Image (cartoon, grey):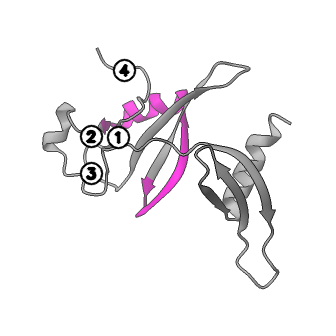
Amino acid sequence: MSADFFQPGRTYTDSDRGTDWAFRVDHITTCPETGERAALGWRHFYGVWEPYAYHTDDWDLHQLVGHTEVTEGSEEKASASAATVTPDTPEPLLVSRFDVAIEPAPEEEPVLTIGAIAEDGRPVALLLDVETRAKVARWLGSTA
């Protein structure tokens, strides 16, 4: 039986390898208001890994354009040469405390630094460029 949405611990990529797009799913969450699912993980595109979320509508589109699971053990893995895709999914780093937000000086790159502490006590620095800050602001704007 095929899945009806992205699955945690799995990595997806272009079935024809026409691009370097890949998406490694770390977690599935749901909107508390609508119940819409979102897959949280890491997207690889244009040579860069970035944190990313795909929603239910995105799943339908991915099936339409032929994205394929390439996680170790899937049927496609044997024919997939996904050197840039890491099939092993580490445990997500859970951040439970945010301590400081540091605005950049005018002469520095416009990157906001957020200092946080993971649940296991490790320090975490989130570096948000202008585009990412705008994306987060849009997300927070719908819940504020």
User: Mark 3 or mark 2: which comes first in sequence?
Assistant: 3
Query: Separation of disc 3 and disc 4 at Cα?
Result: 22 Å
Instruction: Assess disc 2: are there few (<14), some (14-19) or many (≥20) residues with their C-alpha within 10 Å of its C-alpha.
Output: many
Q: Quadrant of the C terminus?
A: top right
Residue hosting label 2: 70
Q: Nearer the viewer, mark 3 or mark 2?
A: 2
User: Mark 3 or mark 4: which comes first in sequence?
Assistant: 4
Q: Residue furthest top?
A: 1
x then y, percent, for residue 27: 50, 34
Residue hosting label 4: 3
User: Mark 1 or mark 4: which comes first in sequence?
Assistant: 4
Task: Say what amino acid the circle numbered 3 marks.
Answer: Arg
Task: Say what amino acid the circle numbered 2 marks.
Answer: Val
Q: Are marks 2 and 4 in contact (CB under 8 Å)?
A: no
Residue hosting label 1: 12
Left or right? Give the position of 85 relative to 113: left
Q: Are marks 1 and 4 in contact (CB under 8 Å)?
A: no
x then y, percent, for residue 57: 54, 29
Q: Are marks 1 and 2 in contact (CB under 8 Å)?
A: yes
Q: Which mark is residue 106?
A: none
Left or right? Give the position of 52 relative to 81: right
User: Mark 1 or mark 2: which comes first in sequence?
Assistant: 1
